[in-house]
Amino acid sequence: MNDLAEIISQNEDRIRAEWIRSMSNTVQRADLISKAELDEQCRDILRAIVAGVKTSRPTEISSSGWATGRELLSEISASRARQGFSPVEVATFVLSLKQPLFAAIREKFVSSQEKLFDTIWSATELLDRLALVTTEAYMATREELILRQQQELLELSTPVVKLWDGILALPIIGTLDSARTQVVMENLLESVVATNSKYAIIDITGVPTVDTLVAQHLLKTITAARLMGAECIISGVRPQIAQTIVHLGINLEDVVTKAKLADAFALALQRSGRTVVRSSSAPTSPISNLFAKRED
Amino acid sequence: MDRIPVLRMGSLLLITIQVDMHDKLALQLQDDVTERISEWGATGVLIDISSLEIVDSFIGRMLANIAAMSRVLGADTVVVGMQPAVAITLVELGMSLPGVRTALSVEAAMELLYGAATRADDAST
């Protein structure tokens, strides 16, 4: 195996130059990564490969001899995933090393067919495995990114707003699944306790579809709120959703539902013994307001 | 053996649960409440569980039972100040306590019970 290490360290500069050239033919992204940075990364990886080949066999990519190489590659592909490279571009980064490396190997073993084949085979195996490492790291970074965004979305999309003394509103945006119901429920119940609110309006205008599962989640939230002594009103039921609820046979008879948030708010005000009265002295438009001031 | 005190406030009974409920305590409470209702002729029972942090199906059933027993004896039950975690647990256990009335605070609960009492008086006169 040390043949491979020897070939790489002997021809390092040439291999690197060709590697970068073959990459620039296919996928080099000058807009995302600078030439100097790329050069630096290639040099590091070649050194890591030499160090790895010297201590371990290329098939044992998970052994300790390859630790630095693995780390380096994972780091590079992780940073590329964040920079916005496509998976093809990230994998090609390693795979385009094949051509210059094979050329160097062929030069070395011109005479011995058998040795040439063996070395090329182990080099192929090695580079394929390294490419898999990069792809895996790329995917892991992407998944992490998605997970974080999901969490942020979860926190963003469940605000509890206070409409009036003792009246809360909870506008739900997006589909309700079990995880979100949990967050919504906890948020709502905590706010009910914190603000001592007797009425909570759950607005489902932003919920695209209501199926039996979503309805069940809603009913759970409402039951929990009722157990604490708060009353829930569902608002924002769109005509389409009302039809769906009836067709699915979902029983919402024990729950007060309203078409608009305003209706629900009016009901909550009425139940808490308040009425909204239009003050007669209020100006009907901003313009008359101006006139009134001038008369003073 | 310690027991949960049942306080009398006019025509209401006030029960504040401040210790971890265990089975014996719960059964003792059931006995006490039913006895006091018939003894004092109470029309309402307030159970304050605001300091109860952990709940299981047994406690849930006990609350439902006390409510049902009180109703048989002619008194309304209001459970007061349930913590969010407790409410979520009960819902997940499938115990929605259908016959039990609830309130956020003792004040609100008394309003609820007295309101019901005065309305009943209005209707009878």
Image (cartoon, coloured by chain):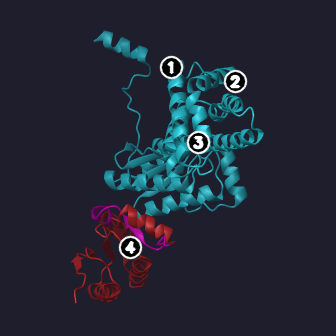
Labels 4 and 3 touching (C-beta < 8 A): no
**Vertical placement of B1 versus A14: above or below?**
below
Disc sitting over residue A26 in the figure: 2
Image quarter (top left, top right, bottom left or bottom right) of the N terminus of chain A:
top right
Closer to the chain start, of discs 3 and 2, is 3
Name the residue: 66% across, 50% down.
A242
Q: Nearer the viewer, residue B101 or A274?
A: B101
Q: Are marks 2 and 4 on the same chain?
A: no
Q: Amino acid at mark 1?
A: Ala
Q: Which of the chains is red? A: B
Name the residue: 38% across, 75% down.
B76
Disc sitting over residue A2 in the figure: 3
SS category of the residue bearing label 2? helix
Labels 2 and 1 touching (C-beta < 8 A): no
Tell me the quarter of the picture where residue B23 sits: bottom left
Q: Are marks 4 and 1 on the same chain?
A: no
Disc sitting over residue B53 in the figure: none
Q: CA distance from mark 3 to mark 1?
A: 29 Å
- Residue annotated with mark 1: A36
Q: CA distance from mark 4 to mark 1?
A: 63 Å
Tell me the quarter of the picture where residue A10 sits: top right
The answer for which chain carries disc 3 is: A
